[in-house]
Amino acid sequence: MERHEISRIAHRDHPIAAPLSDESVKWLLARLLRGRADGRLLDLGCGEAAWPVRALAAHPGLRAVGVDTGAAGLEAGRRSAERAGVADRLGLRHADVREFTAAEPFDAVLSVGAAYAFGGLGPTLAAVRPLLAPGGAVLLGESYWEGEPSPLARELFGDELFDLSGTVDAVRAAGWEPVAGHTSTRAELDAYEWAWTGSLTDWALDRPAGPDREQALRTADAHRREWLTGYRSAFGFVTLVLRPGA
Ligand SMILES: C[S@@+](CC[C@H](N)C(=O)[O-])C[C@H]1O[C@@H](n2cnc3c(N)ncnc32)[C@H](O)[C@@H]1O
Protein backbone atom coordinates (compact mmCIF):
# COMPACT_ATOMS: atom_id res chain seq x y z
CA MET A 1 0.00 0.00 0.00
CA GLU A 2 1.15 3.52 -0.72
CA ARG A 3 1.67 6.12 2.00
CA HIS A 4 -1.41 8.10 0.93
CA GLU A 5 -3.62 5.00 1.18
CA ILE A 6 -2.29 4.24 4.68
CA SER A 7 -2.96 7.84 5.67
CA ARG A 8 -6.51 7.69 4.28
CA ILE A 9 -7.31 4.59 6.37
CA ALA A 10 -5.62 6.06 9.46
CA HIS A 11 -7.82 9.16 9.25
CA ARG A 12 -11.09 7.25 8.91
CA ASP A 13 -12.22 8.16 12.44
CA HIS A 14 -10.53 11.57 12.60
CA PRO A 15 -11.09 13.32 9.27
CA ILE A 16 -9.19 16.46 10.35
CA ALA A 17 -5.57 15.34 9.95
CA ALA A 18 -4.43 17.38 12.95
CA PRO A 19 -4.92 17.12 16.74
CA LEU A 20 -8.06 19.25 16.96
CA SER A 21 -11.54 18.39 18.22
CA ASP A 22 -14.66 19.17 16.16
CA GLU A 23 -15.44 21.97 18.58
CA SER A 24 -11.97 23.54 18.14
CA VAL A 25 -12.28 23.31 14.34
CA LYS A 26 -15.64 25.06 14.47
CA TRP A 27 -14.29 27.81 16.75
CA LEU A 28 -11.19 28.38 14.59
CA LEU A 29 -13.22 28.57 11.37
CA ALA A 30 -15.54 31.12 12.99
CA ARG A 31 -12.52 33.25 14.04
CA LEU A 32 -11.01 32.92 10.57
CA LEU A 33 -14.16 33.80 8.63
CA ARG A 34 -15.46 36.39 11.13
CA GLY A 35 -19.12 36.10 10.21
CA ARG A 36 -18.39 36.47 6.50
CA ALA A 37 -21.37 35.34 4.41
CA ASP A 38 -19.42 34.89 1.16
CA GLY A 39 -15.83 35.01 -0.12
CA ARG A 40 -13.16 32.57 -1.22
CA LEU A 41 -11.17 30.12 0.89
CA LEU A 42 -7.98 28.27 -0.11
CA ASP A 43 -6.61 25.20 1.72
CA LEU A 44 -2.97 24.43 0.88
CA GLY A 45 -2.33 20.75 1.73
CA CYS A 46 -6.05 20.07 2.22
CA GLY A 47 -5.80 16.26 2.66
CA GLU A 48 -9.41 15.01 2.55
CA ALA A 49 -10.72 18.59 2.40
CA ALA A 50 -12.22 18.30 5.89
CA TRP A 51 -11.64 22.02 6.65
CA PRO A 52 -13.13 23.40 3.42
CA VAL A 53 -16.12 21.05 3.57
CA ARG A 54 -16.94 22.21 7.11
CA ALA A 55 -16.40 25.86 6.20
CA LEU A 56 -18.66 25.56 3.14
CA ALA A 57 -21.40 23.79 5.12
CA ALA A 58 -21.41 26.61 7.71
CA HIS A 59 -21.14 29.50 5.20
CA PRO A 60 -23.56 29.05 2.28
CA GLY A 61 -22.11 31.93 0.21
CA LEU A 62 -18.49 30.77 0.50
CA ARG A 63 -16.52 29.08 -2.30
CA ALA A 64 -13.35 27.04 -1.67
CA VAL A 65 -10.33 25.51 -3.38
CA GLY A 66 -8.27 22.68 -1.89
CA VAL A 67 -4.81 21.70 -3.15
CA ASP A 68 -3.01 18.44 -2.36
CA THR A 69 -0.67 15.91 -3.97
CA GLY A 70 -2.66 12.95 -2.56
CA ALA A 71 -5.16 11.70 -5.12
CA ALA A 72 -6.90 9.29 -2.70
CA GLY A 73 -7.41 12.06 -0.12
CA LEU A 74 -8.84 14.39 -2.78
CA GLU A 75 -11.23 11.68 -3.94
CA ALA A 76 -12.37 11.15 -0.33
CA GLY A 77 -12.77 14.95 -0.09
CA ARG A 78 -14.90 15.04 -3.22
CA ARG A 79 -17.19 12.33 -1.80
CA SER A 80 -17.54 14.06 1.56
CA ALA A 81 -18.33 17.37 -0.19
CA GLU A 82 -21.08 15.57 -2.10
CA ARG A 83 -22.48 14.06 1.10
CA ALA A 84 -22.48 17.53 2.70
CA GLY A 85 -24.20 19.06 -0.37
CA VAL A 86 -21.34 21.55 -1.00
CA ALA A 87 -19.53 19.92 -3.97
CA ASP A 88 -20.67 22.65 -6.39
CA ARG A 89 -18.74 25.25 -4.33
CA LEU A 90 -15.50 23.25 -3.88
CA GLY A 91 -12.68 22.96 -6.42
CA LEU A 92 -10.06 20.29 -5.69
CA ARG A 93 -6.65 20.53 -7.39
CA HIS A 94 -4.25 17.60 -7.59
CA ALA A 95 -1.08 19.69 -7.47
CA ASP A 96 2.01 20.61 -5.51
CA VAL A 97 1.25 23.62 -3.29
CA ARG A 98 4.63 25.12 -4.26
CA GLU A 99 3.41 25.42 -7.83
CA PHE A 100 -0.09 26.68 -7.10
CA THR A 101 -1.05 30.09 -8.51
CA ALA A 102 -4.45 31.77 -8.81
CA ALA A 103 -5.84 34.58 -10.92
CA GLU A 104 -7.81 35.99 -7.97
CA PRO A 105 -6.69 36.20 -4.31
CA PHE A 106 -8.50 34.48 -1.42
CA ASP A 107 -10.17 35.88 1.70
CA ALA A 108 -8.95 33.00 3.85
CA VAL A 109 -5.94 30.73 3.34
CA LEU A 110 -5.32 27.58 5.40
CA SER A 111 -2.16 25.60 6.02
CA VAL A 112 -2.83 23.08 8.78
CA GLY A 113 -0.16 20.48 9.48
CA ALA A 114 1.23 21.15 6.01
CA ALA A 115 3.91 23.85 6.47
CA TYR A 116 6.54 21.18 5.82
CA ALA A 117 5.39 21.18 2.17
CA PHE A 118 6.97 24.62 1.77
CA GLY A 119 9.96 23.82 4.02
CA GLY A 120 8.62 25.38 7.25
CA LEU A 121 6.72 28.25 8.70
CA GLY A 122 8.63 31.19 7.15
CA PRO A 123 8.47 29.91 3.55
CA THR A 124 4.78 28.99 4.03
CA LEU A 125 3.86 32.50 5.15
CA ALA A 126 5.91 34.02 2.31
CA ALA A 127 4.06 31.82 -0.23
CA VAL A 128 0.67 32.67 1.27
CA ARG A 129 1.00 36.44 1.22
CA PRO A 130 0.44 37.04 -2.53
CA LEU A 131 -2.56 34.67 -2.45
CA LEU A 132 -4.36 36.65 0.26
CA ALA A 133 -6.89 39.40 -0.55
CA PRO A 134 -6.84 42.68 1.40
CA GLY A 135 -8.59 42.20 4.76
CA GLY A 136 -8.08 38.42 4.55
CA ALA A 137 -6.72 36.06 7.22
CA VAL A 138 -4.60 32.92 7.38
CA LEU A 139 -5.13 29.80 9.49
CA LEU A 140 -1.78 28.23 10.30
CA GLY A 141 -1.59 24.96 12.25
CA GLU A 142 1.90 23.90 13.26
CA SER A 143 3.65 21.54 15.69
CA TYR A 144 5.99 22.92 18.34
CA TRP A 145 8.21 21.56 21.10
CA GLU A 146 6.43 21.61 24.45
CA GLY A 147 9.57 20.48 26.30
CA GLU A 148 13.07 19.29 25.54
CA PRO A 149 12.72 16.86 22.58
CA SER A 150 14.32 13.43 22.89
CA PRO A 151 16.99 12.49 20.31
CA LEU A 152 14.36 10.27 18.60
CA ALA A 153 11.89 13.19 18.45
CA ARG A 154 14.56 15.39 16.86
CA GLU A 155 15.37 12.65 14.40
CA LEU A 156 11.66 12.32 13.47
CA PHE A 157 10.90 16.02 13.12
CA GLY A 158 14.27 17.49 12.19
CA ASP A 159 15.35 20.90 13.45
CA GLU A 160 12.48 22.84 11.87
CA LEU A 161 10.26 23.18 14.94
CA PHE A 162 10.38 25.95 17.58
CA ASP A 163 8.89 26.06 21.06
CA LEU A 164 5.57 27.94 21.38
CA SER A 165 7.05 31.37 22.01
CA GLY A 166 9.62 30.78 19.24
CA THR A 167 6.73 29.88 16.88
CA VAL A 168 4.92 33.13 17.66
CA ASP A 169 8.19 35.09 17.35
CA ALA A 170 8.84 33.52 13.93
CA VAL A 171 5.32 34.39 12.75
CA ARG A 172 5.69 38.02 13.89
CA ALA A 173 9.20 38.29 12.41
CA ALA A 174 7.67 37.21 9.07
CA GLY A 175 5.29 40.19 9.31
CA TRP A 176 2.09 38.57 10.65
CA GLU A 177 0.01 39.20 13.79
CA PRO A 178 -1.91 36.43 15.61
CA VAL A 179 -5.52 37.57 16.13
CA ALA A 180 -6.74 34.25 17.59
CA GLY A 181 -5.11 31.00 18.59
CA HIS A 182 -5.72 27.56 20.00
CA THR A 183 -3.12 25.30 21.64
CA SER A 184 -4.27 21.69 21.36
CA THR A 185 -5.02 20.08 24.71
CA ARG A 186 -3.44 16.82 25.83
CA ALA A 187 -6.81 15.15 25.13
CA GLU A 188 -6.82 16.47 21.54
CA LEU A 189 -3.20 15.42 20.96
CA ASP A 190 -3.83 11.92 22.32
CA ALA A 191 -7.21 11.51 20.58
CA TYR A 192 -5.54 12.16 17.23
CA GLU A 193 -2.78 9.59 17.78
CA TRP A 194 -5.15 6.94 19.19
CA ALA A 195 -7.47 7.44 16.21
CA TRP A 196 -4.57 7.22 13.72
CA THR A 197 -3.10 4.02 15.14
CA GLY A 198 -6.46 2.53 16.17
CA SER A 199 -8.22 2.98 12.80
CA LEU A 200 -5.32 1.37 10.96
CA THR A 201 -5.22 -1.56 13.39
CA ASP A 202 -8.99 -2.00 13.20
CA TRP A 203 -8.87 -1.98 9.38
CA ALA A 204 -6.06 -4.58 9.38
CA LEU A 205 -7.90 -6.92 11.74
CA ASP A 206 -10.88 -6.97 9.35
CA ARG A 207 -8.59 -8.18 6.50
CA PRO A 208 -7.47 -11.74 5.75
CA ALA A 209 -3.82 -12.55 6.45
CA GLY A 210 -1.66 -11.09 3.70
CA PRO A 211 0.77 -8.29 2.85
CA ASP A 212 -1.73 -5.39 3.30
CA ARG A 213 -2.78 -6.59 6.74
CA GLU A 214 0.85 -7.11 7.82
CA GLN A 215 1.91 -3.70 6.50
CA ALA A 216 -0.98 -1.91 8.25
CA LEU A 217 -0.29 -3.62 11.60
CA ARG A 218 3.45 -2.90 11.32
CA THR A 219 2.85 0.75 10.43
CA ALA A 220 0.37 1.27 13.29
CA ASP A 221 2.77 -0.33 15.77
CA ALA A 222 5.78 1.70 14.57
CA HIS A 223 3.77 4.95 14.67
CA ARG A 224 2.47 4.21 18.20
CA ARG A 225 5.99 3.46 19.43
CA GLU A 226 7.37 6.68 17.95
CA TRP A 227 4.52 8.63 19.53
CA LEU A 228 4.70 7.01 22.99
CA THR A 229 8.45 6.74 23.34
CA GLY A 230 9.67 9.47 21.01
CA TYR A 231 7.56 12.64 20.99
CA ARG A 232 4.45 12.41 23.21
CA SER A 233 6.16 14.10 26.16
CA ALA A 234 7.65 16.95 24.12
CA PHE A 235 5.15 17.77 21.45
CA GLY A 236 2.48 20.44 21.06
CA PHE A 237 0.30 21.79 18.26
CA VAL A 238 -0.86 25.37 17.85
CA THR A 239 -3.37 26.78 15.37
CA LEU A 240 -3.21 30.54 14.79
CA VAL A 241 -5.43 32.96 12.91
CA LEU A 242 -3.06 35.50 11.38
CA ARG A 243 -3.44 38.82 9.66
CA PRO A 244 -0.68 40.72 7.88
CA GLY A 245 0.92 43.21 10.28
CA ALA A 246 0.91 46.94 9.64
C1 LIG B 1 -1.02 16.43 8.02
S1 LIG B 1 -1.89 16.48 6.50
C2 LIG B 1 -3.03 17.79 6.84
C3 LIG B 1 -4.25 17.76 5.97
C4 LIG B 1 -5.29 18.85 6.26
N1 LIG B 1 -4.69 20.17 6.25
C5 LIG B 1 -6.02 18.63 7.55
O1 LIG B 1 -5.77 19.37 8.53
O2 LIG B 1 -6.89 17.74 7.59
C6 LIG B 1 -0.73 17.25 5.39
C7 LIG B 1 -1.19 17.23 3.95
O3 LIG B 1 -0.25 17.98 3.15
C8 LIG B 1 -0.15 17.34 1.88
N2 LIG B 1 1.11 17.76 1.23
C9 LIG B 1 2.37 17.56 1.65
N3 LIG B 1 3.26 18.10 0.79
C10 LIG B 1 2.52 18.66 -0.21
C11 LIG B 1 2.85 19.40 -1.39
N4 LIG B 1 4.12 19.67 -1.70
N5 LIG B 1 1.84 19.84 -2.17
C12 LIG B 1 0.54 19.58 -1.86
N6 LIG B 1 0.18 18.90 -0.75
C13 LIG B 1 1.14 18.45 0.07
C14 LIG B 1 -0.19 15.87 2.22
O4 LIG B 1 -0.55 15.08 1.09
C15 LIG B 1 -1.25 15.85 3.33
O5 LIG B 1 -2.54 15.63 2.80
Image: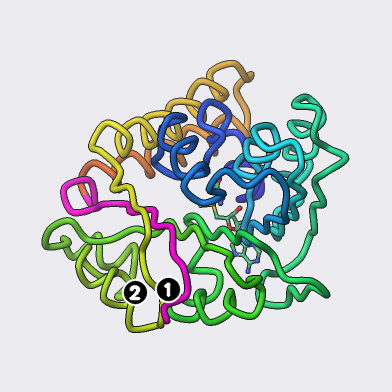
Q: For disc 1, does the CB lie below 8 Å from ligand 1?
A: no
* Amino acid type, callout 1: Leu
Looking at the picture, how far across and down is residue 170, in whole percent?
31, 77
Way the structure is coloured: rainbow
Q: Nearer the viewer, residue 138 or 111?
A: 138
- Residue that appears at 57% across and 23% down: 203
- Residue that appears at 47% across and 30% down: 22
Mark 2 surroundings: few (<14), some (14-19) or many (≥20) residues within 10 A: few
Residue pointed to by mark 1: 121
Mark 1 surroundings: few (<14), some (14-19) or many (≥20) residues within 10 A: many
Q: Are marks 2 and 1 in contact (CB under 8 Å)?
A: yes
Q: Nearer the viewer, mark 2 or mark 1?
A: 1
Q: Nearer the viewer, residue 129 or 83?
A: 129
**Residue 122 lies in quadrant:** bottom left
**Residue 48 lies in quadrant:** top right
Looking at the picture, how far across and down is residue 72, in whole percent?
74, 44
| Residue 242 located within the stretch drawn in magenta | yes
Left or right side of 75 for 178: left
| Residue 110 located within the stretch drawn in magenta | no
Looking at the image, tell me whether mark 2 or mark 1 is earlier in sequence order.
1
- Residue that appears at 58% across and 65% down: 136
Residue interval drawn in magenta: 230-246
* Amino acid type, callout 2: Glu
Q: Secondary structure at mark 2?
A: loop
Residue pointed to by mark 2: 160
